Image (cartoon, grey):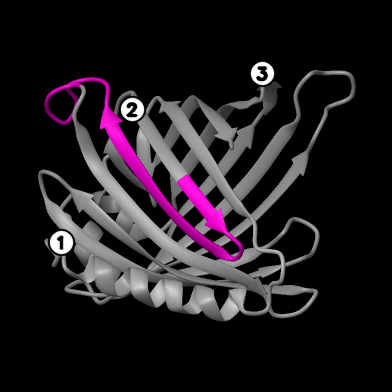
Amino acid sequence: MDKPMQRQGVLGALVILALSYGRCGMAQETDTVFGLTVTTDFFSKYVWRGQNITNDWVFQPGVCATWGDVTLGYWGSLDLTDENGEPGEFIEHDWYAGCSTQINELIGFSVGAIYYYFPSLGDTAELYWGLSLDAPASPSLTVYHDVDAVDGAYAALSVHHSIEKLGHLPFGIDLAANLGWGSSNYNDAYWGVESCELNDLTLTAGFPFEIVGTSVTPRITCITLLGGDIRDVADDETMVVAGIGLAKEF
């Protein structure tokens, strides 16, 4: 997979843009609250937007800070085997900034930026915006725009539903589905396919429970590629990812 080499200096501008939107949203809030969440995930593969980045076990830590409507965070992916090189090396570091607010009782809006750094490939950045509905299955649409050489877009239509407890069982269930679409420029850059089409469908089931204040979620995900041109060039048309995620809020 070829990732575009981008300008690292774009990060500052994107963070400023995201925080500027955040201040607008926060101006309407009277009870700003700070929160911090630390996550550590272990998965059998790393699949991103239908692309099999690491075909073996990975460790993916993250930290997310929220202040009112504003979110700042970091996420990384570390290979646990020699699938992409030496085991124990980070292949990706992501930093993100954004905010979300309610337009009205039904519709929510989010905007932000993500900066991706790949130690062996370079960097890239995206702006994103999203809409969500306060309705059954919590549907949302998020569109990501590359801000440099790719000049393409990826859109994700998502739904999810959570049940806190399954009868007398000590765990709940989180169900989610994500349908992804890529523009012709996006697909050309990431797949070598010069057409816009539906890219991938991702179905996820998680079974969260709590241990000493830490959320533990065994999870299984099935990803299938949809576009005919993309399926023709991909090594795997359908992938299954299993693993476990831990999250601690402070």
Q: Is residue 34 left or right of residue 17?
A: right
Q: Within the image, what quadrant is residue 72 found in?
A: bottom left
Q: Residue at the far right: name it.
A: 167
Q: Position of residue 138 (x, y in %)?
A: 72, 59
- The 10 Å Cα crowd at callout 2, few under 14, some 14 to 19, many 20 or more, is many
The residue where tag 3 is placed is: 212
**What amino acid is found at the position of numbered circle 1 in the picture?**
Pro
Question: Which residue sits at x=25%, y=77%?
Answer: 151
The residue where tag 2 is placed is: 58
Q: Are marks 2 and 1 in contact (CB under 8 Å)?
A: no
Is residue 163 in sight in this rendering?
Answer: yes
Q: Nearer the viewer, mark 3 or mark 1?
A: 3
Frontmost residue, 162 versus 1: 162
Question: Which residue sits at x=33%, y=23%?
Answer: 57
Question: Which residue sits at x=63%, y=35%?
Answer: 205
Quadrant housing the C terminus: top right
**What amino acid is found at the position of numbered circle 2 in the picture?**
Val
Frontmost residue, 187 versus 84: 84
Give the secondary structure at mark 3: loop
Q: Are marks 3 and 1 in contact (CB under 8 Å)?
A: no
Indicate whether 214 appears above or below 71. Answer: above
Q: Position of residue 69 (x, y in %)?
A: 59, 66
Give the secondary structure at mark 1: loop
The residue where tag 1 is placed is: 4
Residue 83 highlighted magenta (yes or no): yes
Instruction: Return the disc, 2 or 1, that comes first in the chain's sequence.
Output: 1
Instruction: Return the disc, 2 or 3, that comes first in the chain's sequence.
Output: 2
What span is in magenta?
Answer: 64-87
Q: Position of residue 122 (x, y in %)?
A: 12, 54
